[in-house]
Amino acid sequence: MSHSPAGLLITGCTVLVHDGQERVGFAPDMAIVVRDGRVESVGAAAEVAATGLAALEHIDARGQVALPGLVNCHTHAPMVALRGLAEDLPTEAWFNDVVWPVESNLTAKDVELGARLACAEMIRAGVTCFADHYFSMDTVAAVVAECGMRAHLGEAYFSSQGPEGREKSLEFALRHRGAADGRITTALAPHAPYTVTAADLAATAELALEHGLPVHLHAAENREQTDTSLARHGLTPIEVLDRAGLLATDLLIAHGTGIIDRDLPVLERANGRTAVATAPRGYLKFAWPDTTPIRALRALGIPVGLATDGAASNNSLDVWESMALTSLIQKSAEGDPRWLTSRQALHHATLQSARAVGLGDSIGSIAPGRRADIILVDLTGPHTRPVHDLAATLVHSARSADVRTTIVDGRPLMRDRELLTLDVPAVVRELEDRLPALVDRGHGRRIQEYDT
């Protein structure tokens, strides 16, 4: 161990650990030593104290659990500006009557303010990294650089934009790859098989392989999309992706509640690293009949990461809630209380979510050599006592508001519930002034038509 002072020393906490078989466990009364943005060591607090190690910053975390920072594997962060605007509507009306007309008003400034508000919400809820797929993403990248989060970003495009949309998506991905001291990774971001032509999907697959870029898109979001695709093309959305060559790329598929049995062998044969992001709250809200088939996907070795989608459909960016809901909805969908357990839910929230966004080697667990993306959760509240099963306490009793401290790359972005890198009241004031122009639908325009 180096004799120069560590950057950060966290002592007295219980640490969530993954064993050699990737099972989730807990190590009590530990110390985490962070140096140069990485975890240097995780050891017994008493032993680290005995070495007399000095650190530039020390956090006494007694009564708290250290978890890897949560990852929001699919969201549209700036859509927090539309939170609660399109309520109690079926999917088609939600898109065509509210969201796509309002999104045609978006300016880069609206996106910036939305992204700031979203990052503040996520930091306060223990999310250290998010995968975003939206417009004016240069602005989102700038906010990520400024606020200290980690993000996997893609500039969304529709075929209705012509070749410029696809070119802009590529240009964004190449320009920002590795930005913000390496905290930003990028992807190509075609919107979905129902808004992007087969030719554009195939061109995207070629660009992804040529430039070593992953692809992040919506596909088989619900069963209706799958049925429509079968009627129109004789192929499921997953088979459309396969035919376009996208299953040879590193592919992140949002939602997948419309993945059916005939898709499973197609996904199993995929040459690339395929992952799926599940955002269960929105599926309940839209009254979709199915949820992401996590059990079947996991049997194929496909990681399923946790997500919220945008706050226009989910109303929040709370991945903690996604973790609890995923466990509950899977029990209900499978008719089996033994699946998905609290420990499995924690695995989805940590390592699987890190893998889903292509960061499985650098985040997702608290272990030597990993980036120091760590959250400290306070379990002293009455709603989390007593603790008979720590995994169950975390998933089903604790809330995102119990996160006390959020750390990315060894830097605290929130300490004792105080945000250190964002000024929320200023953002809210400026956003409120812009809302009338943003939500006006009198112009009759919309950026796209939903008719799957």
Image: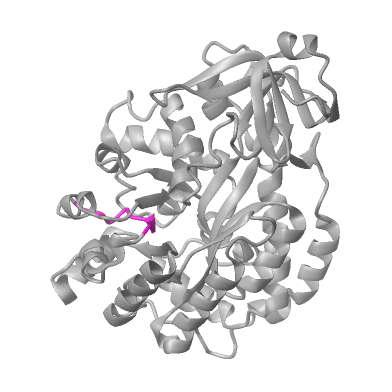
Near-viewer residue (64 or 388): 64
Q: Is residue 340 visible?
A: yes
Q: Is residue 440 left or right of residue 357?
A: right
Q: Position of residue 407 (x, y in %)?
A: 71, 39
Q: Position of residue 449 (x, y in %)?
A: 40, 81
**Going 69% across and 59% down the picture, which residue do you hit?**
180
Give the quadrant of residue 439: bottom right
Give the quadrant of residue 58: top right
Q: Is residue 341 magenta?
A: no
Near-viewer residue (172 or 424): 172
Q: Position of residue 40 (x, y in %)?
A: 67, 29
Q: Is residue 279 visible?
A: no
**Going 52% across and 73% down the picture, which residue do you hit?**
99
Q: Is residue 337 above or below residue 412?
A: above
Colouring style: one colour
Q: Position of residue 172 (x, y in %)?
A: 56, 74
Q: Is residue 253 magenta?
A: yes
Q: Is residue 150 above or below residue 202?
A: above
Q: Is residue 123 left or right of residue 208?
A: right
> Where the N terminus falls, by quadrant?
top right
For the record, the magenta segment spans: 250-260
Near-viewer residue (299 or 3): 3
> Where the C terminus falls, by quadrant?
bottom left
Count how many numbered circles sit on residues in the image: 0
**Going 35% across and 78% down the picture, which residue do you hit?**
196
Q: Is residue 416 above or below residue 297?
A: above
Give the quadrant of residue 208: bottom left
Q: Is residue 17 left or right of residue 12?
A: left
